[in-house]
Image (tube, rainbow, N blue to C red):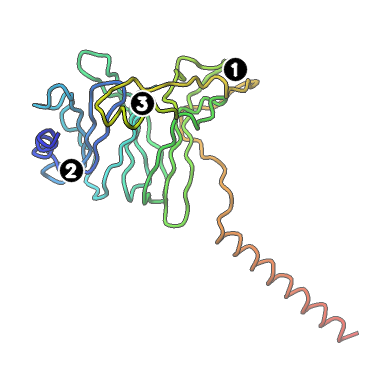
């Protein structure tokens, strides 16, 4: 494995590596020799050359954080310090993987970090295929990505059985060198039929609960308003 990493590091300064689930590919994200941010895709069966040559993104300095959904084969690239998130559809079934750009999620708020919810936590009733958690200076904001569908039925083509939280091996078996296929679970049991969907495949921001700082500021604002009114009442009482 160390030799594998060394091969990749010769071509770019890698900041993140992500294994693409059921496919024998790895996505590496980092910086090229000219300090441009880029990503590559490698076949783990042959690390000699990348199957997708370096794809340049921009000249920003923040590290790229990749996330991959193996059910929809969507690749999300979020950059530290960026406001936008790029996402692509990757066809790993082709003779040579094909990467197709989908959309950008844009925001004026820079990203300090990013997390990815397991598919089991997505809302399948609104065709939510991914939910990322954007960490900023003061908040953690959930970002929901949905696929537009007119049909009110469960979309089994985009919600195939996903990884379960039940282990396929015991600790002793795994330490003993055994392998097993990860256990899966159907998401259909969490589906609630809806009348009609008008969602589009863009970022849908989940409504956030007010932060503690926001609640405190609202309380202080109301307190000042009450104090102003009380002072006015005293003034009127004194003049009568």
In this rendering, position of residue 119 left or right of residue 19: right
Residue 86 screen position, x and y as percent: 34, 36
Q: Which residue is mark 1?
A: 152
Residue 149 screen position, x and y as percent: 52, 19
Q: How many marks?
A: 3
**Secondary element at image label 3:** loop
Residue 36 screen position, x and y as percent: 18, 43
Q: Is residue 231 above or below residue 192?
A: below
| Residue at left offset 42%, top offset 52% | 136
Q: Nearer the viewer, mark 3 or mark 1?
A: 3
In this rendering, position of residue 103 left or right of residue 23: right
Q: Which residue is mark 3?
A: 169
First in sequence: mark 3 vs mark 1? 1
Q: Is residue 229 above or below residue 145?
A: below
Asked if the residues shown at circle 3 and circle 1 are in contact, with their CB atoms under 8 angstroms apart, the answer is no
Asked if the residues shown at circle 2 and circle 1 are in contact, with their CB atoms under 8 angstroms apart, the answer is no
The quarter in which the C terminus is drawn is bottom right
**Secondary element at image label 2:** strand
Residue 83 screen position, x and y as percent: 38, 46
First in sequence: mark 3 vs mark 2? 2
Marks 3/1: CA–CA distance: 37 Å
**Secondary element at image label 1:** loop
| Residue at left offset 12%, top offset 27% | 47
Q: Nearer the viewer, mark 3 or mark 2?
A: 3
| Residue at left offset 57%, top offset 24% | 190
Neighbourhood count class around disc 1 (C-alpha, 10 Å): few under 14, some 14–19, many 20 upward = some
Q: Which residue is mark 2?
A: 31
């Amino acid at each position: 494995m160390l030799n594998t990493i060394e091969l990749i590091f010769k071509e770019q300064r890698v900041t993140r590596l992500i294994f693409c689930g059921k496919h024998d590919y790895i996505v590496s994200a980092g910086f090229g020799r000219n300090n441009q941010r880029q990503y590559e895709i490698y076949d783990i069966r042959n690390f000699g050359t990348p199957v997708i040559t370096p794809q340049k993104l921009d000249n920003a300095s923040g590290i790229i954080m990749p996330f991959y959904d193996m059910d929809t084969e969507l690749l999300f690239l979020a950059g530290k310090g960026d406001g936008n998130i790029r996402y692509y559809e990757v066809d790993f079934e082709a003779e040579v993987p094909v990467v197709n750009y989908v959309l950008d999620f844009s925001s004026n708020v820079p990203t300090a970090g990013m997390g990815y919810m397991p598919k089991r936590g997505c809302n399948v009733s609104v065709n939510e295929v991914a939910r990322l958690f954007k960490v900023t200076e003061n908040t953690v904001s959930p970002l929901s990505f949905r696929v537009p569908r007119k049909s009110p039925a469960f979309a089994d083509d985009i919600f195939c059985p996903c990884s379960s939280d039940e282990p396929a091996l015991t600790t002793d078996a795994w330490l003993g060198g055994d392998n097993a296929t990860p256990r899966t679970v159907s998401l259909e049991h969490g589906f609630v039929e809806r009348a009609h969907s008008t969602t589009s495949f863009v970022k849908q921001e989940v409504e956030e609960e007010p932060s503690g700082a926001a609640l405190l500021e609202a309380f202080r604002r109301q307190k000042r308003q009450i104090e102003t009114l009380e002072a006015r009442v005293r003034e009127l009482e004194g003049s009568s």
